[in-house]
Amino acid sequence: MTVNWADFTPWTALGGGLLIGLAAALLVLFNGRIAGISGIVGGLLRPAPGERGWRIAFLAGLIVAPLVYMLAAPLPAMHIDAGTGTLIAAGLIVGIGTRYGAGCTSGHGVCGLARASARSLAATLAFMGAGFATVFIIRHLLA
């Protein structure tokens, strides 16, 4: 995936970040739950009583939001420099990592850091560092 810096708009990025923060804060305020996507999806596999509705609504919002956005403006063009097999392998590795790390970027990086969680800081540093190292190795050492 590449970023077209000529079309980068910091105001929409700021707006998106504010919306993510607002959604995470509202979920904690009204449901007492952390907006960690892996935990929300994982909770659908074995839902506790009364848990299914809000989880489905949250995930539906993630799917519907870009469709609503398309009514106001076109979605940015994307170019992914990987094949289907690579994407499937990467998804499986990320999924396994979220289980070992007891969370994902939204749970640890957004919600956990906002709560000043030391565990979330360690997790965020670990997965961001692993991501940086992976990109460096693949793009610069193996290319």
Image: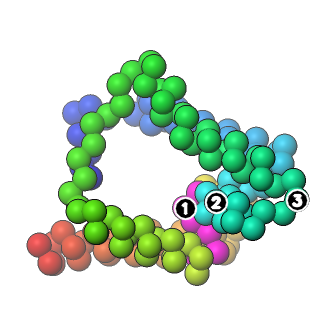
Mark 1: few, some, or many residues within 10 Å (few <14, many ≥20)?
Answer: some
Residue underneath mark 1: 105
As drawn, the label of residue 49 is 3
C-alpha separation, residue under disc 2 versus residue under disc 1: 14 Å
Disc 2 crowd, CA 10 A, few/some/many (<14, 14-19, 20+): some
Measure the alpha-carbon separation of dots 3 and 1.
26 Å
Which numbered disc flags the more N-terminal residue, 2 or 1? 2
User: How many neighbours does mark 3 have within 10 angstroms: few (below 14), some (14-19), or many (20 or more)?
Assistant: few
Residue type at mark 1 is: Thr
Of pointers 3 and 1, the one earlier in the residue sequence: 3
Q: Quadrant of residue 132?
A: bottom left
Residues 101 and 11: in front is 101
Above or below, 116 against 13 in this view is below
Placement of the C terminus among the 4 image quadrants: bottom left
Marks 2, 1: nearer the viewer: 2
Can you name the residue that lies furthest to the right here? 49
Q: Give yes or no for residue 103 being in the magenta stretch.
A: yes
Q: Residue 62 appears at what percent x and percent y?
A: 57, 42
Observer-nearest residue: 12 or 51?
51
What residue do we see at 54% from left, 34% from top?
Answer: 65
Can residue 5 be seen in the rendering of this structure?
A: no
| Mark in the foreground, 3 or 1 | 3
Give the side of residue 142 with respect to residue 85, left or right.
Answer: left
Secondary structure beneath dot 1 equals helix
Which mark identifies residue 41? 2
Q: Position of residue 95 (x, y in %)?
A: 51, 71
Q: Where are the magenta residues, as a range?
A: 101-107
Query: Does dot 3 land on a helix, a strand or a loop?
Result: loop
State which quadrant residue 106 falls in.
Answer: bottom right
- Reply above or below: 117 against 80: below
